[in-house]
Image (cartoon, rainbow, N blue to C red):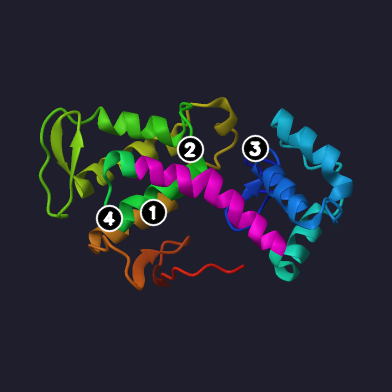
């Protein structure tokens, strides 16, 4: 429980009981198991939490222990997480990237990371709204050295110039969320490190991720992450 108004957070993306994507994973898992598995006794409560958007963590018993156990022992549960990740986050993020004409790994990765945290919709804090706010900043051509040019509002804008502006917009949104559901405590503001890591990669000119990428870890320390295309099932 991160106490961020989203209930329990777990899994490869950080699926939440209070936002509904954890319930989506469990429903997908039920399809793979025939609907009779360790999560089944919790179904009615998890559905209620998802439908109401409640951050309550009561009434779901050993939810965290079950998730941890199945995440380690059941390939079907990992597959269910992969399916919801792809459908809910990767595919929508890829569509935004394609619509914008993003060609660089770092920009495409940022669309995915933002979609996971902010959602891929068009609410005030959603990825769609952040892109719209970013695009509104450009009323003339903006040159750069990334080798990739976007057409923004009829203007030729370097992709990294655009990405830097997007990171500014996202940082402002993290510090000043527009949606009331995201304003509890100081949790969103405390996650600006996610943006700082991308800024660091830009400074290192790590635009395309082939094999590995130099970024900052969650503590702000430089590290190298290996990039692999194969997925665990």
Residue 63 shows in this picture = yes
Q: Secondary structure at mark 1?
A: helix
- Front label number (3 vs 2): 2
Query: In the rendered image, which residue does mark 3 sit on?
Result: 19
User: Residue 109's mark?
Assistant: 1
Magenta portion: prevailing SS class: helix
**Residue drawn at 13 percent across, 33 percent down:** 155
Q: Are marks 3 and 1 in contact (CB under 8 Å)?
A: no
Nearer-the-camera pick, 214 or 104: 104
User: Eyeballing the image, is 3 above or below 39?
Assistant: above
Disc 4 residue crowd, few under 14, some 14–19, many 20+, Cα 10 Å = some
Examine the structure image and report whether residue 199 is included in the region drawn in magenta: no
Q: Which residues are magenta?
A: 76-97
Q: Identify the mark nearer the N-term, 3 or 2.
A: 3
Label 3 and label 1: CA atoms lie apart by 22 Å
Place of residue 153 in the rendered image (x, y in percent of width and height, measured from the top left):
19, 28
Label 4 and label 2: CA atoms lie apart by 19 Å
Label 3 and label 2: CA atoms lie apart by 13 Å
Query: In the rendered image, which residue does mark 2 sit on?
Result: 120
Q: Identify the mark nearer the N-term, 4 or 2.
A: 4
Place of residue 29 in the rendered image (x, y in percent of width and height, measured from the top left):
73, 53
- Front label number (3 vs 4): 4
């Amino acid at each position: 429980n991160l106490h961020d108004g989203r209930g329990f957070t777990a899994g490869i993306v950080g699926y939440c009981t209070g936002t509904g994507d954890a319930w989506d994973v469990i429903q997908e898992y039920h399809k793979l198991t025939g609907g009779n598995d360790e999560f089944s006794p919790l179904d009615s409560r998890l559905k209620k939490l998802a439908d109401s958007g409640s951050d309550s963590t009561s009434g779901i018993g050993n939810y965290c222990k079950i998730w941890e156990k199945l995440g380690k022992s059941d390939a079907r549960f990992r597959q269910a997480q992969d399916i919801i990740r792809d459908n809910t986050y990767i595919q929508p993020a890829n569509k935004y990237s394609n619509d914008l004409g993003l060609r660089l790994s770092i920009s495409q990765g940022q669309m995915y990371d933002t979609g996971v945290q902010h959602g891929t919709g068009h609410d005030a804090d959603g990825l769609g709204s952040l892109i719209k706010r970013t695009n509104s900043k450009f009323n003339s051509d903006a040159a750069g050295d990334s080798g990739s040019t976007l057409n923004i509002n009829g203007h030729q804008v370097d992709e990294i110039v655009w990405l830097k502006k997007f990171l500014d917009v996202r940082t402002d949104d993290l510090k000043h969320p527009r949606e009331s559901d995201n304003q509890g405590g100081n949790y969103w503001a405390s996650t600006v490190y996610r943006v700082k890591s991308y800024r660091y990669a830009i400074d290192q000119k790590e635009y395309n991720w082939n094999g590995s990428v130099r970024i900052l870890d969650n503590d702000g320390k430089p590290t190298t992450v290996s990039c692999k295309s194969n997925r665990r099932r």
